[in-house]
Image (cartoon, helix red, strand yellow):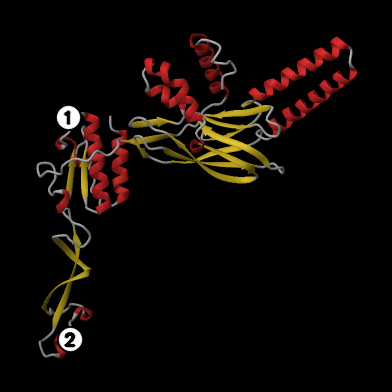
């Protein structure tokens, strides 16, 4: 939060002050996945509407002194008492709150990362009108060039921070609440969570109490899947020919699908004997079953048709998601990895593990 009006002062003057304040706030709140709001990390100041209230106090006090009017001075002292009570109540509604980070999801570029938080209050009195939001403009500043930032940062910050979809308002907090907040993503790789702002203006909207929380955990962003032609030089089957459930060409011994009848061999289980054939006088025959297995597919970074590194990773992400949804066994080979490090999997959980490898790829 900046206490200086950006519309009146040039950015060359406000930027150093804003950066100094940001460093000071960060120093008072070390990174951690859980935080308790207290005197050290809770701040309180007038809102814009509250500044008008402060001007009213000054005007009534000067008028009462200047004209020697006790009624005006009494009104001034009455308004001051209201301000002091509002100051105290606003601070109490945020002080002592416990916030803990529970989960951070993985997302593709351009999609939001969802952060799950536990908000706990041990006070007997409920806390009201608590606002939770991440400072989305920090990410926007990092991803834009200096020229674009000067031109668009003010408008983008205002839109992001005022977007109701990117913030959560809890009207009443008592005991424990679970909330989920999104963080917009702009590039692949490791994402450092921006600072979380917890604020309230209850009860009168004159004062605003807020606190910044800096989480130690990070999130991972994998490439946005890029569709490509499945060709035989880099995969053993085309997308249209990929085997689906029940359409595999190889089988292993199992108990799912009937495969053939063979002559009974002494020592085999009588449960597998086809007694219908015995009843018809055709001898003792044993039923054999098989479980289908799929063709192992190979996703290799070197075989991707794209020319650029990030596009190759995006094509690998598309292949991993597609094969994982089909349940086809596959491996994924990334640069600087040996073949022994490439495990074989066949489900969506393995596809998610592959997406994490893509997000962590250098």
Decide: few, some or many residues near mark 1? Use Cα within 10 Å; few <14, some 14-19, many ≥20. few
> Which residue in the structure is indicated by mark 2?
276
Nearest to the observer: residue 308 or residue 332: 308
Q: Quadrant of residue 104?
A: top left
Residue 252: percent from left, percent from top: 17, 63
Front residue of 254 and 353:
353
Q: In the picture, which quadrant includes the N terminus? A: top right
Structural crowding at the residue carrying mark 2, measured as other residues with C-alpha within 10 Å and reported as few (<14), some (14–19) or many (≥20): few
Q: Position of residue 181 (x, y in %)?
A: 49, 39
Which image quadrant for residue 281?
Answer: bottom left
Q: Is residue 130 above or below residue 39?
A: below
Q: Residue at x 50, y 34 (%)?
A: 163
- Give the image location of residue 19, x and y in percent: 51, 16
Observer-nearest of 293 and 131: 131
Helix, strand or loop at disc 1? loop
Indicate the secondary structure of the residue bearing disc 2: helix
Q: Which mark is residue 307?
A: 1
For image coordinates 63% across by 42% down, the residue present is 171
Q: Tell me how many marks there are.
A: 2
The quadrant in which the C terminus is found is: top left
Report the disc number at residue 26: none
65 versus 137 height, above or below: above
């Amino acid at each position: 939060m900046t206490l200086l009006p950006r519309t009146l002062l040039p950015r060359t003057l406000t930027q150093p002050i804003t950066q100094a304040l940001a460093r000071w706030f960060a120093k008072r709140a070390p990174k951690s996945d859980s935080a308790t709001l207290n005197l050290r990390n809770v701040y309180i100041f007038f809102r814009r509407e509250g500044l008008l209230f402060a001007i009213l106090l000054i005007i009534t006090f000067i008028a009462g002194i200047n004209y020697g009017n006790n009624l005006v001075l009494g009104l001034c002292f009455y308004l001051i008492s209201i301000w002091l009570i509002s100051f105290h109540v606003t601070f109490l509604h945020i002080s002592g709150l416990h916030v803990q980070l529970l989960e951070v999801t993985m997302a593709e570029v351009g999609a939001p990362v969802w952060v799950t938080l536990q908000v706990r209050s041990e006070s007997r009195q409920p806390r009201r009108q608590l606002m939770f939001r991440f400072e989305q403009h920090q990410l926007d500043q990092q991803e834009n060039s200096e020229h674009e930032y000067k031109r668009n940062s003010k408008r983008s910050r205002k839109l992001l921070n005022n977007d109701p979809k990117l913030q959560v308002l809890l009207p009443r907090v008592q005991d424990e609440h679970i909330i989920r907040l999104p963080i917009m993503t702009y590039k692949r790789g490791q994402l450092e969570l921006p600072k979380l702002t917890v604020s309230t203006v209850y009860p009168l909207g004159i004062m605003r109490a807020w606190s910044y929380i800096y989480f130690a955990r990070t999130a991972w962003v994998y490439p946005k899947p890029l569709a490509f032609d499945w060709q035989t030089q880099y995969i053993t089957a085309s997308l249209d020919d990929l085997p689906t459930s029940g359409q595999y060409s190889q089988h292993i011994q199992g108990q799912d699908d009937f495969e053939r009848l063979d002559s009974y061999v002494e020592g085999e289980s009588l449960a597998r004997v086809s007694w219908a054939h015995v009843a018809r006088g055709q001898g003792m025959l044993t039923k054999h079953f098989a479980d289908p297995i799929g063709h192992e597919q190979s996703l290799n970074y070197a075989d991707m048709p794209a020319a650029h590194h990030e596009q190759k990773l995006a094509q690998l992400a598309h292949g991993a998601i597609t094969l994982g949804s089909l349940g086809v066994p596959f491996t994924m080979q990334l640069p600087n990895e040996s073949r022994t490090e490439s495990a074989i999997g066949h489900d969506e959980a393995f596809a998610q593990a592959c997406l994490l490898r893509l997000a962590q790829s250098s």
